[in-house]
Image: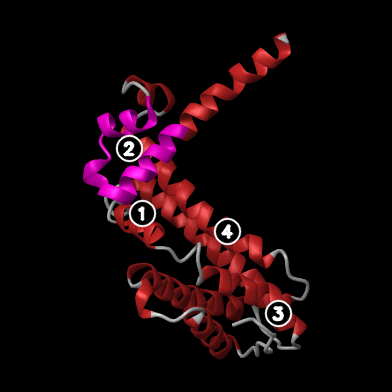
């Protein structure tokens, strides 16, 4: 019994930090940066305002943590689909399709990104976080592209794979933004199909048709 109480005590601070981050994300999605005040965050999390300074050095530090959580969650949801495939082609296909379909393509996710992104050029910590999360996604895409090209017998230098990843990442980002902003403008799987066609054109790969897949 004593060990159970100690375990709960150790977990409680992390649970509180998590609640503050989730409250920040909720407010950023619903009201934007203007609504994510210290008072509103604390009330949404069910805590006192002093708890924010207890777990984070400042409100800005909490905003950075929330932004990093949001961006990593999107990438993790995408990577989870890629990891379930066997061949390199299928891993790359799954990564692209997951990037351009719900729940990754989502109006709330795009609203959150839009609320955060204007802070990137004004705040160094936000810029550092943006850089880390951008490279994490792009580097993962580069690894998948390189593996798919090797599997297909296509020669490519690291520099070529890097350029392919930059270009493909830009296409995916653009489609993701439009899908989140105007979800009703696109048919089911349309963005994923466009993404696969675009990545194939950039990389010289051919995605073989699969039954029931984009």
For disc 1, the marked residue is 112
Q: Closer to us: mark 3 or mark 2?
A: 3
Any mark on residue 60, and which? 2
- Please provide the residue range marked out in magenta: 19-46
1 or 4: tag closer to the N-terminus = 4
Quarter where residue 97 is shown: bottom right
Q: Are marks 1 and 4 in contact (CB under 8 Å)?
A: no
For disc 3, the marked residue is 89
Q: Quadrant of the C terminus?
A: bottom right
* Residue 48 visible at all: yes
Query: Residue 150 in the image: x percent, y percent?
Result: 74, 81
Any mark on residue 77, and which? 4
Quarter where residue 205 is shown: bottom right
Per the model, the C-alpha gap separating discs 3 and 2 is 41 Å
85 lies left or right of 26: right
At 64% across and 72% down in the image, what residue appears? 94
Per the model, the C-alpha gap separating discs 1 and 4 is 16 Å
Q: Closer to us: mark 2 or mark 4?
A: 4
**Is residue 29 covered in magenta?**
yes
Per the model, the C-alpha gap separating discs 2 and 4 is 26 Å
């Amino acid at each position: 019994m004593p060990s159970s109480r100690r375990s709960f005590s150790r977990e409680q601070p992390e649970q509180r930090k998590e609640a503050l981050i989730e409250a920040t994300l909720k407010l950023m999605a619903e009201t934007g940066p203007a609504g994510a005040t210290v008072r509103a965050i604390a009330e949404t999390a069910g805590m006192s305002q002093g708890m924010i300074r207890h777990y984070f050095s400042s409100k800005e530090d909490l905003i950075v943590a929330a932004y990093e959580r949001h961006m990593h969650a999107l990438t993790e949801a995408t990577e989870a689909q890629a990891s379930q495939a066997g061949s390199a082609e299928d891993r790359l296909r799954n990564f692209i399709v997951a990037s351009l379909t719900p729940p990754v393509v989502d109006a709330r996710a795009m609203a959150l990104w839009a609320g955060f992104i204007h802070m990137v050029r004004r705040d160094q910590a936000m810029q550092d976080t943006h850089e880390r999360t951008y490279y994490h996604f792009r580097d993962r895409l580069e690894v998948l592209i390189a593996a798919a090209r090797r599997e297909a017998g296509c020669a490519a230098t690291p520099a070529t794979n890097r350029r392919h990843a930059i270009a493909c990442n830009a296409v995916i980002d653009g489609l993701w933004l439009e899908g989140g902003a105007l979800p009703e403008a696109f048919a089911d799987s349309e963005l994923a199909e466009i993404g696969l066609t675009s990545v194939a054109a950039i990389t010289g790969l051919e995605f073989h048709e699969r039954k029931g897949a984009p």
